[in-house]
Amino acid sequence: TKIPDITVMETVCDGEEPEVVTQACLLSEFSEKGEARALINSLPDIHHDPVSREATIEKFVVIMDRYQEQPHLLDPHLEWMLNILLEMIRNEKSPPLMVHLCFKFLYIISKVRGYKIFMQLFPHEVSDVLPVLDLLCRQDPKDTETWETRYILLLWLSMTCLIPFDLSRLDGHLSTDPGLNRESIMDRILAVAKSFLRVSDKSRDAASVLVSKFVTRPDVKLKRLGDFLDWCLTTISQTSEITMEGTVTLDGALQSLAQLFKHGKRDDFLQYAPTVLQCLNQKRIAESNQATLRKLGVKVVQRLGLTFLKPRLAKWRYQRGSRSLAVNLAQSSVTGSVEATKTDLESVSQEEDYDIPEDVENIIEQLLVGLKDKETIVRWSSAKGIGRVTGRLPKQLADEVVESVLECFSFQETDNAWHGGCLAFAELGRRGLLLPSRLSDVVPLIIRALTYDEKRGACSLGSNVRDAACYVCWAFARAYEPSELKPYVNQIASALVIATVFDRNITCRKAASAAFQENVGRQGTFPHGIDIVTAADYFTVGNVNNCYLTISVYIAGFEEYTKPLIDHLVHMKVNHWDGVIRELATKALHNLTAQAPEYMANTVLPQLLPMATGMDLHRRHGAILACAEITHALYEIATQKNRLHPDPVIAFLHPDLVFSCLFFSVCGLIEKLSLSKMPFKDDPVITGWQWLIDDSLKNLHLFSSGARRGIQDSALSALAALCRQYYQVEPGVANVEIQYLSALMSPEVLTRCGCALALGSLPPFMIRGKLQKILPGLQAACKVVQKAESQTEARRDAATAMSQVCVAVGVCAQGSPDRVLCEGNIRPVYEALLGCMNDYSMDSRGDVGAWYVHMPPWRCILVLQNIVQRMMCCLVQQAAEKIDRYRAHAGTVFLRLLHSTDPAVPHIPHREELLRNSLNWNAASQAFPHITQLLRLHQYQYHTLLGLTVSVGGLTESTVRYSSQSLFEYLKGIQQDATVLQQFGDTLLCIFRDNLRNDRVSVPLLKMVDQILANGCFELFTSEESHPFCVELLALCKEEIKKSKDVQKLLSCVAVFCGMVQFKGDVRQKVLVQLLMLLCHPFPVVSPLALVLCPRFNSDSIVSLGSEDQEDDCQPVRTHRNQLCDWLGLPRPILVTKVTHLGN
């Protein structure tokens, strides 16, 4: 059976520890084998249908792709899948389309399992050679739809080439019968391979595999090896990479060379190696612009190096245990066999040193240059080449290679060289070619690489270097005995921990975590390794905030890591180019202060203060924030221990420091110094600090848009802390005047915003006694002024500040109006806030007036009856409107007021009826059925219907659907109650009347009325001639579209007129007159009218009417229109002549 895709393993710890749940993707077998078999067997039935064929392929790809990470699970099933598909391919009755489809399925399987494993399953008997070759020759290399067929056939032919018979036996009488003019099989296969080495699809890769298998055959290499190598070298030397075709040709030739020198015998290829190397040097592949060609050049060069050097196992290499698993397992019981095995192993490599060919030096130099290439694939291939070639060199020459790799770590080199050097050291260490004597040179460089970060413009380089350095640490953990790495354990452990929690890049943090875990498991000498691995595992380090603020604190609790973590933050992260990292670093320093307070005060702060006055803005910003955070942390520690600040804090943090610093960071410093209660009271520097805060708030428009919010928030926090600490001469008494009121009417919007929020952030003792000045100023700033929509932000922040002021001073019914909220000043506050709820200002950003809805809530039990009624009605209106998040917020506040018990809100209309209904405004589908029930309550009907108008006549599909359904359900329920329906109609007309020519309401209302009329909701009114509702609705519609040029409004009104035709009496005649008049409107609204009128009046005039071009001449339209008026018995509209008065 199949284990679930997500296997959950739970471990319940003792005590109060929570359950530790680990999730991992794990597949136990090929569970979809039945479905895969069905899909393969269905190919004969679906191959002719493009839709079914595409769906079948997609299903098969989805099934196979699940096993990309565990392809070995397919091994037991590869054979039967291959046999079924090959049987269809070999069937002579199979159409070509189905054959190609079978090969596509074979390619999908080989892609997942890998061609090296999959190709071994192809039948490779003598009888298979000619059919496969003939089928391959019939393929069109230029057909882009069937490249999978050619790819699989080339792999299949590669396997058939391994038959242990001379290919000349398959040629029959070719050599003896001069009358037969055909090629030998050997020549045909070579011709096919050469032709497919020039194609641009994946068949080129399979052709190189075919070459490596075929040309290395004993019979072929005797006759064709030299010729084929000549062809490759000629192709390389004569082909230019400037064109795409030339690049493809070079790619195929280089691939074939790399495969040949990889799989061929050294004795066969040694004589050709110098010539090949000379050709590559002349072609200068390493200087090519194509990364793929440079990578293939490196692959060929390293294979040439291995050809020049004898295959030998270096006896000087470092070995950790035995390379044999069986020997390692038997080591504890049979020690003698271990020694014997080691002796045999050494005897293999007991060869005298031999002269190294001069070409090897050239090859090593090219590989070292490849380590500095700008592409990762070239550097990685070069690193593997360095490892392979060094393994065959004498100890002295190998040490020179290591010395050359060390030169990549100069700070004059680019990040590419550092990355390549790390990859090379990882390969050398993994192969035992980096001796322990060299660790003293290598480890410091790797530790520096773990923190490599170089700023380039708006980004940085070095994440790949740090990731490769983690790979080096991972490789060293597996390569060396614990005793060899013991001198470097603390350095490596600290560096990996730092990278795990403080690296900016998530992949580097995860790589460092994996390397640390490998060292803990393999070496067993890392301090507190198990504890750290548990806290900073691969998944936990994914969140950078968690790493900086939580995990680092836990790790710093271990003495070995405390100072390295702090020092790294001070020297590397406080001055980081990324502002987010700088701020996180300063917060981390705040959290780490508790682990080493004396070190922070005596060592870290003296280092930060010179940085805070330097020329580098990043360094200055980070240093100031760090000083602020550390000072505040030291104050908190001192407070907990009931003692004064450490002297070094006061000595080094002189207040004059701030005048040479940045706005944002200095405001943070002011806040932290104030919270730390520094002894600066009555000091002149407080005046300077206040000036800086005021200047920041009043000149926000001078800052960039991205920095404004941060500067404003920082300045407000600093102001609040500064006022609380330094402006209170005695409890409840302030010694400073408020200077922000005059700026509330500033022409600069952001100045209004900053000063209004500054008033809201003042502590209560500064507001009391000045409340009668502050509240009127904020109330005036909240008022909507015509043609001042650009002041929306200022009105929003003034309303926010007013709520903050009210919360700060508190409520006392009989108190002083200048000190608290009371009966004397509460009404204007509510009037201002309720006025904000009716602000529907629009600009290019949309409905900016809706920003008021999310103001901070505040509690006040001092409310009057009429105020409560207006407040609840306004909330209901907002809860019925179209924007989901505002509707949900208004509904939440409504419920909070309704259900409040401590204190209970008095005077809520229909409280008992509302409490019986469970209201929920979070989703449109759930909210509107409840909202429409409020239409039954007289005092809520107007505002509920006003909100529903905007929703039903809106644009959002889901909102329109759910709101209209709910409204129609309500109207259906009152169809037989004339009184209630009349009341609803009166409310609707009242809303129309109050919002005449207010497009925000009138256009959605017309759309809503059209839907109501179309659904027959006013059918009760149709029995009475010229019902008052119809008469007034017609009058309002006429007034609404009078002189209007809004096409949407005109179309909506036309739809309403069409719906009103159902009413009897004079209203119908007047409606038809309006429709006929609109037929001659200069805007294109004729077609909808003609479509409405056509079912009633069938005439050629209607057809002609709809086909006239109104923009050219309205007279033909008027003629047909007048004819319709005569048929309907209606008076003809009279064209009013415009009178133009000429001036003097």
Image (cartoon, helix red, strand yellow):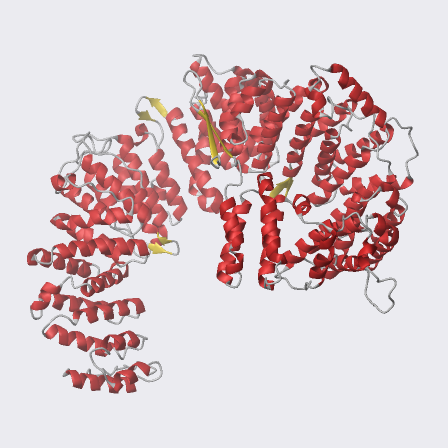
Task: Determine which quarter of the picture holds residue 569.
Answer: top right
Q: Is residue 751 left or right of residue 231?
A: left
- In this picture, is 273 found above or below 483? below
Image spot of residue 545 (x, y percent): 49, 32
Give the left or right position of residue 545, taking residue 854 as reference: right
Name which residue lies at 86% across and 30% down: 394
Q: Is residue 605 left or right of residue 1087?
A: right
Q: How many marks?
A: 0
The residue positioned 67% from the left and 57% from the top of the image is: 150
Q: Is residue 563 visible?
A: yes
Position above or below: 1009 against 605: below
Q: At which x and y percent is residue 531?
A: 54, 20
**Residue at 66% over, 43% down:** 117
Quadrant housing the C terminus: bottom left
Closer to us: 806 or 1103 = 1103
Is 1010 placed above or below 496 here?
A: below
Q: Tell me, yes or no, if residue 825 can be seen here.
A: no
Report which quarter residue 306 is drawn in.
top right
**Foreground residue among 602 and 683:** 602
